[in-house]
Amino acid sequence: MGSREVSVTVLSGPDEGKTRRYSQPRVTLGRDQGNDFVLSDGFVSNEHAEFTLRDDGKLLFRDLKSRHGSTVVINNSTRKLHNEDRETQLTIKGGTEVQLGSSLLRFDISSATERPTLDNEDLGRGRRNGQPKRHVQDQSEDEPADTDDDDKVVVENENLITTAHRPVQTINRRLESADTRLAALFHLAGQLNGLTALDEMLELIVETTFQSFRGANFFAVTLGSDPDEVSTREPFMTQARGEVPLPEGEDAPLLSTSILRRVASTRESVLFTKDSIGSEVTQSILDAKITACMCAPLVGQKSLLGIMQVDTRGRGSLFTRQDLELFNILASNAAFAIERARLTESIMEMFEGFVAASVNAIEARDPVTAGHSERVAHYTLALAEVVNDIETTELRDVHLDPEEMRELRYAALLHDFGKIAVREDVIQKGARLPDEQMKLIRQRFDTIKELSYRQWLYEYAQKLEANDRSYDERGLSQIDEYYHALSHKLDETYQWIQKISTKGYLQDEELARVRALGEKTFFGPDGEQHPYLTPIEVENLCIRKGTLNEEEWKEMRSHAALSESYLDQIPWSDELQLIPCIAGAHHEKLDGSGYPQGLQGDEIMPQVRMLTISDIFDALTASDRPYRKAASIDRALEILNLESGDDKLDSHLVEVFGSIVIPRIEDDVLDPKK
């Protein structure tokens, strides 16, 4: 045994051309780097198989309970080793080819020239439970196998021609290299790689199917994982060749449930003709005028996805066994398309859920602005859709494709994402002085009243004690008048403070009155002088516009940069790469007066300009702000036009927003909950 060597060569697949020689008695194969022979094929299991060089010059090949199994090719016949519950094995000779996943390997033994055979003792070990026994001719070392093409990877069972399903794989010698239809297959594979939408994928598969099988005139795909479900469910897609209606109209039967159930149960492709079925021909097949049909399972990595079929309904054309092999490969492409589309859909659903959860988390910290993100996204996309149709002015060169529109929508929904890091008392500050501070002022004013009354009473008592006749003879009644006058004045002052605390904009005289109150003092119980309003209260009440002081405003403005910073940490796909910078720039202005980066002119993308206009418009017209009344649509547009006149907003976009977009979204603005 030591004088013999085994060479392993990859004939087709991702590692095509790779070859290694081994002299040790046992060699492992798989995707894990710890194997002796490592394959990069995604359909190969981490620990897929192993072989042992026997003393008689043969190899004992063992499948190690791999996911997709191993297929041994012997003289135009195949043997599938596949059992995920136990290892299966087969004795082979040098020169034997074995399919692992989508890779075809050849095993050569030095000094061995005989053709590979199956040992009779191992013939039945790898048979899958419940599947029909394959009619593979027993062979001996002295008797070569029949190489007639009629015996290729085919099982004759119950008068049907079947072939086992295999994963998507490089075309091997089972299909003649001269078959011109192979070019269509390779072209299809290349096109599918660039698609994610299931309907587009299936459209290409249908086109390739009709191109490859000239006699076919009907195609159908039925989805499902359970045989009974697949055999009775309405097809997910049907299509006839050209525009010629099918025989018997749209209500014609598609195929007998027995054939569909068989394919789904055995996961074997089936080719049948009306004559081959004999007594099993069903009324549904007769009614549909089916002469020949190929039916293949759509098998994903973990489960059955459905059934694909093509037939010569209403025609006399037939299919060959080589057609069945080609159709089997097309079915693998379809399974790949469905699985990929479902994965893409699952990812999109997950991402939509993430975006929705993020928006809810942002707005939960500021219930006052609930719905703002959705409204801004709605207005922004409405503006973008209008701009896409404009063929004049500077906007004629602005056009967003569907992927860019999706990117803009997510950016608009997440533009305030950075607010999760802003203090809650800043985000929810709806007045210049929060309620807690207003309560302190109320208590302070009440204290001033009581201390003043007490002081007046004390002075009155002192005069009585000194028999001082200079005091007013009305005595206590005058003190009560002083007290009520002071109380009225302080109550009026408190109500005025409450009013200006929530006012959108303060006039100069209002600011002057606040400062005067801050300079006015009273003597507290400790005998010290105290101001009517503390310095921080004066600072907040002197905010001319809005409710945030300089420090709070700085923190609030940080949310734009934080939005970009946080969103930039997410591994976006190529078509969504601009989400962070679009979201983070929604407060930039064309004249450079915006934040956080002070971008100017062309540094601000059209998407950002649209988002900024929508954000300002909703902030002005929103009816849920407690610190100011909602502006009318006309007033909001007037402010937008003033901003564009000052070169802060894009004048062309503002004009389009007011003249075209607003009439379309006016009802949504007036009734956001509708």
Image (cartoon, rainbow, N blue to C red):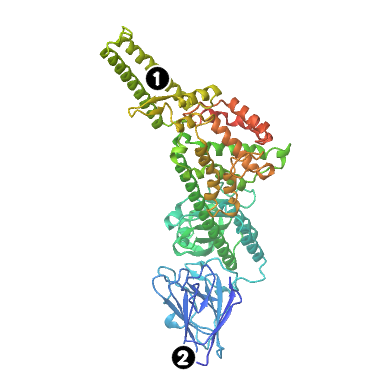
Instruction: Kindly indicate the quadrant of the structure image that contains residue 322.
Output: bottom right
Q: Kindly identify which residue carries mark 1.
A: 491
Callout 1, which amino acid? Asp
155, 670: nearer the viewer: 670
Tell me, yes or no, if residue 381 can be seen here.
no
Instruction: Kindly indicate the quadrant of the structure image that contains residue 399.
Output: top right
> Which numbered disc covers residue 55?
2
Direction left: furthest residue: 465
User: Compared to 639, does 557 lie above or below?
Assistant: below
**Answer yes or no: do the residues labelled 2 and 1 have beta carbons within 8 Å?**
no
User: Compared to 465, does 595 lie above or below?
Assistant: below
Residue 349 pos. (x, y %): 49, 49
- Spatial CA distance of label 2 from label 1 is 109 Å
Q: Secondary structure at mark 2?
A: loop
674, 436: nearer the viewer: 436
User: Compared to 165, does 389 lie above or below?
Assistant: above
Tell me, yes or no, if residue 524 can be seen here.
yes
